[in-house]
Image (cartoon, rainbow, N blue to C red):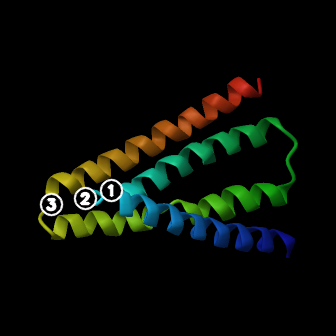
């Protein structure tokens, strides 16, 4: 039961952090490109790579892993929002912005997850 509570609490906190982050960034950046979601996905991807690698090299309780990776970062990253926003850009005829959103989110997520793993390995050899 403790495992489920770790995921539920982490997920709720991650979702609240995502909402706050995207609202703040989207209020500052008023453009068709969904910068808030892009930044959340990029940061979340970095953090999931970093924590995954860190937890591989350190003794970390399973509940903490579930809380941070499955719960918090699962609730924080927004690839479902990304998909909807991309489809909305296509529907609005903003094909260039939609394609940029697809390419940017995917490349940034992969690169930053890899960077997170690399930074963790450098800090925890």
Disc 3 is placed on an element classified as loop
The residue indicated by pointer 1 is: 29
Q: Distance between the residues labelled 1 and 3?
A: 17 Å
Q: How far apart are marks 3 and 2 (CA)?
A: 12 Å
**Quadrant in which the C terminus appears:** top right
The residue indicated by pointer 2 is: 31
Image point (61%, 46%), residue name = 47
Image point (77%, 73%), residue name = 4
Q: In this view, does 117 lie above or below 43?
A: above
The answer to whether residue 18 is left or right of residue 22 is right
The answer to whether residue 109 is left or right of residue 121 is left
Disc 2 is placed on an element classified as loop
Give whichever of discs 3 and 2 has the lower sequence position. Answer: 2
The residue indicated by pointer 3 is: 94
Pinpoint residue 108: horizontal percent, then vertical percent: 42, 42
Pinpoint residue 64: horizontal percent, then vertical percent: 81, 57
Pinpoint residue 6: horizontal percent, then vertical percent: 78, 68
In the rendered image, which quarter is residue 3 located in? bottom right
Image point (71%, 57%), residue name = 68
Give whichever of discs 1 and 3 has the lower sequence position. Answer: 1
Q: How crowded is mark 1: few (under 14 residues within 10 Å), some or many (20 or more)?
A: few
* Mark nearer the viewer, 3 or 2: 2
Front residue of 4 and 100: 100
Q: Residues within 10 Å of mark 3 (few under 14, many from 20)?
A: some
**Quadrant in which the N terminus appears:** bottom right
């Amino acid at each position: 039961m403790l495992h489920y509570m770790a995921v539920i609490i982490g997920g709720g906190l991650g979702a609240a952090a995502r909402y706050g982050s995207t609202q703040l960034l989207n209020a500052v950046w008023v453009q068709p490109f969904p910068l808030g979601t892009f930044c959340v996905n990029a940061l979340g991807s970095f953090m999931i790579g970093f924590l995954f690698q860190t937890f591989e090299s350190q003794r970390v309780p399973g509940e903490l892993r579930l809380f941070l990776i499955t719960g918090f970062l699962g609730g924080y990253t927004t690839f479902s929002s990304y998909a909807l926003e991309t489809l909305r850009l296509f529907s609005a005829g903003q094909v260039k912005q939609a394609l940029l959103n697809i390419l940017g989110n995917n490349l940034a997520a992969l690169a930053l997850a890899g960077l997170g793993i690399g930074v963790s390995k450098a800090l925890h050899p």
